[in-house]
Amino acid sequence: MKKYVVGIDVGGTFTDAVIYNEVDSTLHRTKVLTTAGDQSIGVLKAFQEFYKDLDIDSTEIRRFNHGYTVGINAALTRTGAKTGLLCTKGHREKLDSGGLDRPFDVNTLYNPYWQRPHQIRPIVPRRYRREIAERIREDGSVILSLSEEDVRREVEFLRSEGVESISICFINSYLAPKHEERVKEIVQEIFPEAYVQTSQIHPVAGELKRTWIVTLDAYCGPAINTYLQRLKFRMNEEISYNGEIFIMQMGGGLRTVETIVQAPVNTLQSGPVAGMLGSEYYSRSVLGGKDLVCFDVGGTSTDIGLVKENKADVTTDWELENSIPCGIPAVDVRSIGAGGGSLIIVDEMGSLRVGPESAGSKPGPACYRLGGIQPAVTDACVAMGLIQSELFLDGKMKLDKSLAIQALKNVGDKINMDPITLAQGAYEIVTLNIAEAIDKMLISKGLHPKGFSLMAFGAAGPMFAVNTARELSIPEVVVPYFPGGFAALGMLTSRLKAEHAMSPMEKLDAIGPDRLNALYKEIEESCIKDLEYQGVARKDIKLERIQCGMYQGQSWDQRVSVPVETYTEMNFHGLRKAFDDYYDTVFGYKAEEIPIFLTTIGAIAYGPEPKIQLPQIAAGTEKPPSDAIVFHRELFLDRKTYKEAPFYDRFKLKAGNQIHGPAVIDDHLSTIVVNEGAVASVDSYGNLIIKV
């Protein structure tokens, strides 16, 4: 009987996996080291762990939802395919020019020698950006016909240079794609072995973002598609699984492998997105609609996002690096280089710094005993006593505290600081870095921490949660039942999703209700057919609508949700009001006298929600059962020493129990720190609600 669904998230250090029994609503999880060279090895190892622990096989798996870091790793490390770009003549420098902004950093903002990341480490070197004579007007008509002679010459040049992948993006082709389509035909004719992509994967206005979307797809697509093919083959050959694999998209929601390979750029940032969708599920189904500031601390980075009114924030401004935008709609997850593997360094000025460099999974922190000699945040937490060797990863991986302390001593000696003080300093720096990143995100959205709860997950998130909440004056922390594999759980709570868009580039009033109805009908039908192709019945599809617009004369548009309805003269003004209200909320003003210029309209189609029911735990009293205490150990925290701090086994706690800090709660795959003065209460689902 096929009764299990599996979610697996590949992170920088660990691969997290969750399996859910749809018959009895039980959840199991595991965590294995990420196999960086071939992530499918770690994925199969996680499956094999489940098969061994639950005594099952592939015949009982109904579906598998998956997120990975193959694409973003290729982009960040510049190890993607050797890529060429065919662009409109005169637009060769677009990738280097970037936007008008610089990082708001004193070392960058006023530095006349600063260069954009793509100028220093180009994804497509200038030599491989080739100009084609052609031009389409802003109304979609042709000014200059396509020069097929130019196309053939430049494709032959790229082929002779050993280029593996070709991206095609012409000016205004979002209105009239015929030139791009013809060039793709020519490439496939004379260079059939090349991976080729056009900007029709997201045909909307905004030349910089659209050029980058197709370029990133061409650069990362071959690696992603190779990984997915290898994964399917190995799962079939080694564990006899030949069922469907669903892939998490950047914009949230799942797609089949067969449709993902048509535009793999949609999966650049899939793992952190799944954590946000898990937070959506928690807000909606468990926490009574609470607004959440979410942060996920893993081995390499900290990912931050918001859930408001049961929905994760979505943006079209996601950037791989400064001025390398990927303008497809993406769940707004912001990352900083702060994780368990972040290295603790004394810089050339003698200042203590943590990250963004990471020890990764190999050699990893010094305490892993895998050859690492530089101290990482995990080493600091081991030295402080927050992480105990016999509890780490449910006892499956032994840590060496002496190696952690020695590595810390090697760094501390440079600034006359003992290892424990250094460890606490590094812990505080990580906390402040996370709090600062959250504060910046809230300010950029015109929001205040008041009214939010802090949702902490990832293996290391709950270690920093209480202190982070205190820095931000957030009164409550929520630690979900499975923090160490929460992104994997988020994949199980996700549904199939398709999103399509077009760019009218007109004033809203000039479009009018009748034409807007016709445009939405067209793109909604595209979304519906997309999901039908992936196996969703039309009757089970739900639709949403968005509009991107701005006050006429501005340069940046805003994304606003609007109702799914037939627009008439009576309700059309509500679309205008949605923009005015958004501006008032985010920017503190609205200009009702200025027309709204509508850049893009989009439709989103969702498949049915999965029926995931979190198991409830047994009820108890306010006092935790005595057998929930594993031991008492020395703890260095908040610049104090606690000689006999209790360590609790989370899975022996009962609903209604309260734990007063200082204390540590072992989650088997995560560590939860309850600082002095904080009180953690256990709810009926086993979640910890910490009053800080």
Image (cartoon, helix red, strand yellow):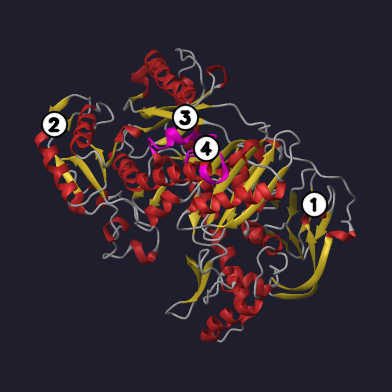
Front position in the image: 531 or 352? 531
**Whole-Å distance between the Cαs marked 1 and 2?**
67 Å
Residue 146 shows which numbered tag?
2
Q: What are the residue bounds of the magenta stretch?
A: 237-263
List x then y, in percent, for residue 607. Answer: 55, 27
Front position in the image: 91 or 188? 188
Element type at mark 1: strand
Front position in the image: 24 or 663? 24
Tell me the residue at 54%/22% (across/down). Answer: 541
Asked if the residue under mark 3 is in contact with the one under mark 4, i.e. CB atoms within 8 Å, the reply is no
Looking at the picture, which amino acid does disc 3 mark? Answer: Ala
Element type at mark 3: strand
List x then y, in percent, for residue 685. Answer: 77, 43
**Residue picked out by circle 4:** 245
Quadrant showing the C terminus = bottom right
**Residue picked out by circle 1:** 681
Tell me the residue at 45%/58% (across/down). Answer: 37
Mark 1 vs mark 3: which is more N-terminal?
3
Between label 4 and label 3, give the one nearer the viewer.
4
Task: Answer above or below: position of 414 versus 60.
Answer: below
Mark 4 vs mark 3: which is more N-terminal?
4
Residue 498 shows which numbered tag?
3
Element type at mark 4: strand
Mark 4 vs mark 1: which is more N-terminal?
4
Mark 2 vs mark 3: which is more N-terminal?
2
Is residue 614 located in the magenta-colored stretch of the structure? no
**Whole-Å distance between the Cαs marked 2 and 4?**
40 Å
Looking at the picture, which amino acid does disc 1 mark? Answer: Ser
Tell me the residue at 46%/54% (across/down). Answer: 38
